[in-house]
């Protein structure tokens, strides 16, 4: 980040290389005795056991939650730093751990509740025994019809369906590396990932429901195969699941010789069982592509033994998942949250996991709560963007339904304290404990969160580091920023952990440069202490050790040398009752360097007036200071959003700066871009 010497420097205080912070500390809230009485983790010695003095051995507590064919020889092998190898020498299979090992005691228990979007279609309850049968038969199909073997990569472009985890677990059973591409992504995004991973097999589904419409999904597969071919990667086999088994439901025809309808082909494999491959702990389990601000998407490569240990451990202790729980995470399995905390975490623990096909607010704002009531969900997991949407369109809906959450998770972006409080009070009915889990595609599992029975909640703070994770916050010059300094910096993780990705698929140099070079103490070192992991997020640590995440370092706005976290401004805007969503973007300013522009979407029925815009601007000045006064408050009808619900600040910034908004066709609501443009650029 460029350093700016400015006239204001003295006035704003603090070093120019750190980010000034103005948060008011929120009050603690405590878990109920009822929750604590049943919690998986109530032993405070965990923090001592997971201190760096005992590193790396403490992570064997997580590995011991799994069933291994052969134990490891070395807990952490650092010889190829910073490509860490966890539980080296161990042999394990992820599919076995998520299915087979539960059969002895729990074969009749529901593994997956699949909820179709149309409410007149029956919910499917798939037992562990049925999952076992279906995964085995599909594994045989992958091996014998598609010719796949251990180490091959397969691209999966599927909607939320029971068949998606079945497909992933079948790949894992064979040792095939799956690369799931979010179903809402375009054919061209899918093709990029096919090319990068050299997949010769693509697995798709004919159609799925979204907001009441049966979408033709197979079409994207045909286009993706064409684009991939031009990019040098031939897909010779497309496996097509049917949304309605036995009834092909897409207008796009089946291509003879290339496409295979899975539901027909499966009849050949009736009753076939496939022994799980004994995988090395460090063998890759899957690739998950993540897009940075620049360059092509990065295929984050996650290993088998370390990853599975870490998600099992964190799902058990941070999400408090017990085998008898019904757990619903609203994320899409096409994102890391879905991999770790819909599929691998909950199933490795033998819980029941809910998969919902459609939109949480379809056909009305009560849908999510009806699902929760119907399935007696007791652990709920979603993102601030969904919470804001639910609050916006149905603030009183949760109270109308009789469900009981003991635990709720939030993930994906910093949650404004106002939104947090609504989530706790209204969705959680004041009874559920809330964990705000901060982590990334790259990290495989949680990095910061409270341990729910041991540490109180603090709205807006992710919490302390989870057991075994030891963060450090550096300023731009590489100095540690101590806890309670009231300043933010670059949050890094000082030690490796088993959930961390192993490398970027096919690009080790980019892996090292992007994530480790910044604060590396010695590039030739084999000692993990010399390789802090750069998360790319800005964060501050309060005196009590809780971390507050301010967003990506790149999103920090430098006003007259005063670096402001965008989230802080957005949280201040959300203290105004009429505001549903807020997004801050930097606008170039001759003197100040940058100025914040604030975009606001109001709650339904609230009129956009000049007075209201001023009230919001005043709230920011009051909470943070005049320095943060927005250049302009734009009251817009809606925010441009990605299909995963993230607000596209990049697009708003381009509009504010009269720049090129780029390709917006992959957004969930591309039409809003022109509407905002007309409003702002008039
Ligand atoms: O900036 C952080 C934000 O989301 C980024 C990671 O995004 P992704 O790889 O898509 O993974 C999302 C699911 C883990 C982080 O670098 N982020 C994620 N969770 C939080 C968060 N920011 C604040 N609080 C969180 N709980």
Image (cartoon, helix red, strand yellow):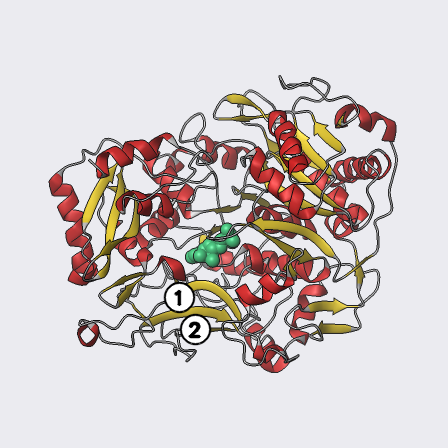
- The answer to whether 580 appears left or right of 668 in the picture is left
Q: Residue furthest bottom?
A: 53
Residue 174: x %, y % from top left: 81, 47
Which image quarter holds the N terminus?
A: bottom left
First in sequence, mark 2 or 1: give its number.
2
- Nearer to the camera, 326 or 577: 577
Q: In this view, does 642 lie to the left or right of 114?
A: left
In terms of depth relative to the viewer, which is nearer, 26 or 531?
531
Rendering coords of residue 252 (x, y %)? 64, 19
Q: Is residue 552 visible?
A: no
Q: Does the closest atom of ligand 1 sit within 8 Å of the Cβ of label 2?
A: no
Depicted 159 relative to depicted 286: above or below: above
Please state the horizontal and vertical placement of residue 313, each as a whole percent of the image. Answer: 63, 61
Q: Distance between the residues labelled 2 and 1?
A: 7 Å
Instruction: Identify the disc placed on residue 539.
Output: 1
Write the residue at 87% across / 40% down: 273
The reply to whether callout 2 and callout 1 are in contact (CB within 8 Å) is yes
Please give the name of the residue rendered at 33% of the width and 53% of the height, measured from the top-left corner: 416
For mark 2, give the secondary structure: strand
Q: In this view, does 240 lie to the left or right of 318?
A: right
Q: In which quarter of the image is the C terminus?
A: top left
How would you rate the neighbour count of disc 2 (Cα within 10 Å): few for under 14, some for 14-19, many for 20 or more? many
Is 296 in front, or is 332? 296
**For residue 533, which quarter of the picture?**
bottom right
SS for callout 1: strand
* Near-viewer residue (38 or 87): 87
Residue 384 picture location, percent across and down: 41, 47
The residue pinned by badge 2 equals: 473
Q: Residues within 10 Å of mark 1 (few under 14, many from 20)?
A: many
């Amino acid at each position: 980040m460029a350093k700016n010497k400015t006239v204001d420097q003295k006035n704003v205080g603090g070093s120019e290389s750190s980010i000034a912070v103005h948060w008011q500390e929120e009050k603690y809230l405590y878990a109920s005795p009822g929750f604590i009485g049943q919690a998986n983790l109530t032993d405070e010695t965990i923090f001592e056991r997971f201190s760096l003095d005992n590193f790396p051995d403490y992570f064997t507590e997580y590995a011991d939650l799994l069933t291994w064919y052969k134990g490891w020889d070395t807990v952490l092998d650092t010889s190829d730093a910073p490509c860490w190898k966890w539980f080296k020498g161990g042999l394990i299979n992820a599919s076995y751990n998520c299915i087979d090992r539960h059969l002895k005691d729990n074969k009749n228990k529901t593994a997956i509740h699949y909820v179709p979007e149309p409410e007149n279609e029956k919910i499917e309850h798939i037992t562990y025994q049925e999952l076992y049968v279906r995964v085995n038969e599909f594994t045989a199909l992958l091996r014998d019809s598609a010719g796949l073997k251990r180490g091959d990569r397969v691209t999966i472009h599927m909607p939320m369906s029971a068949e998606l985890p079945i497909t992933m677990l079948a790949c894992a059973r064979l040792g095939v590396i799956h690369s799931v591409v979010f179903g809402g992504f375009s054919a061209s995004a899918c093709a990029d990932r096919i090319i990068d991973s050299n997949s010769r097999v693509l697995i798709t589904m004919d159609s799925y429901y979204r907001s009441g419409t049966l979408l033709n999904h197979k079409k994207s597969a045909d286009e993706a195969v064409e684009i991939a071919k031009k990019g040098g990667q031939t897909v010779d086999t497309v496996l097509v699941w049917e949304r309605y088994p036995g009834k092909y439901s897409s207008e796009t025809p089946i291509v003879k010789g290339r496409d295979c309808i899975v539901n027909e082909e499966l009849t050949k494999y009736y009753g076939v069982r496939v022994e799980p491959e004994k995988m090395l702990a460090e063998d890759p389990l899957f690739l998950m592509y993540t897009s940075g601000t620049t360059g092509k998407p990065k295929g984050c490569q996650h290993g088998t033994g370390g990853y599975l240990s870490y998600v099992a451990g964190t799902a058990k202790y941070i999400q408090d998942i017990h085998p008898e729980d019904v757990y619903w995470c609203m994320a899409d399995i096409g994102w890391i949250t879905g991999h770790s905390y819909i599929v691998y975490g909950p199933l490795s623990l033998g819980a029941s996991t809910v998969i919902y096909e459609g939109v949480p607010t379809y056909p009305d704002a009560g849908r999510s709560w009806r699902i929760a009531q119907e399935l007696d969900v007791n652990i709920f997991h979603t993102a601030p963007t969904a919470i804001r949407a639910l609050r916006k369109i149905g603030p009183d809906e949760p109270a109308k339904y009789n469900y009981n959450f003991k635990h709720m998770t939030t993930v994906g972006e910093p949650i404004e304290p106002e939104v947090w409080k609504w989530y706790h009070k209204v969705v959680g009915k004041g009874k559920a404990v809330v964990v705000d889990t901060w982590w990334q595609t790259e990290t495989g599992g949680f990095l910061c969160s409270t341990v729910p029975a041991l540490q109180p909640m603090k709205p807006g703070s992710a919490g302390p580091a989870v057991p075994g994770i030891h963060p450090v916050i550096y300023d731009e010059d590489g100095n540690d920023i101590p806890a309670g300094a009231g300043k933010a910096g670059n949050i890094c993780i000082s030690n490796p952990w088993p959930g961390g990705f192993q490398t970027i698929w096919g690009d080790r140099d980019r892996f090292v440069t992007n994530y480790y070079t910044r604060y590396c103490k010695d590039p030739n070192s084999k000692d993990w202490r010399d390789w802090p992991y750069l998360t790319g997020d800005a964060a501050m640590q309060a005196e009590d050790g809780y971390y507050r995440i301010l967003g990506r370092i790149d999103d920090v706005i430098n006003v007259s040398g005063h670096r402001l976290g965008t989230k802080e401004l957005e949280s201040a805007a959300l203290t105004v009752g009429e505001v549903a969503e807020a997004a801050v973007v930097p606008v170039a300013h001759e003197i100040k360097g940058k100025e914040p522009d604030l975009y606001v979407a109001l709650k339904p029925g609230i009129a956009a007036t000049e007075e209201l815009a001023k009230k919001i601007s005043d709230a920011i000045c009051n909470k943070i200071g005049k320095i943060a006064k927005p250049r302009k408050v734009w009251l817009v009808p809606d925010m441009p959003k990605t299909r995963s619900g993230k607000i596209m600040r990049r697009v708003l910034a381009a509009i504010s700066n009269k720049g090129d908004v780029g390709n917006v066709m992959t957004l969930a609501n591309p039409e809003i871009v022109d509407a905002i443009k007309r409003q702002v650029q008039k």
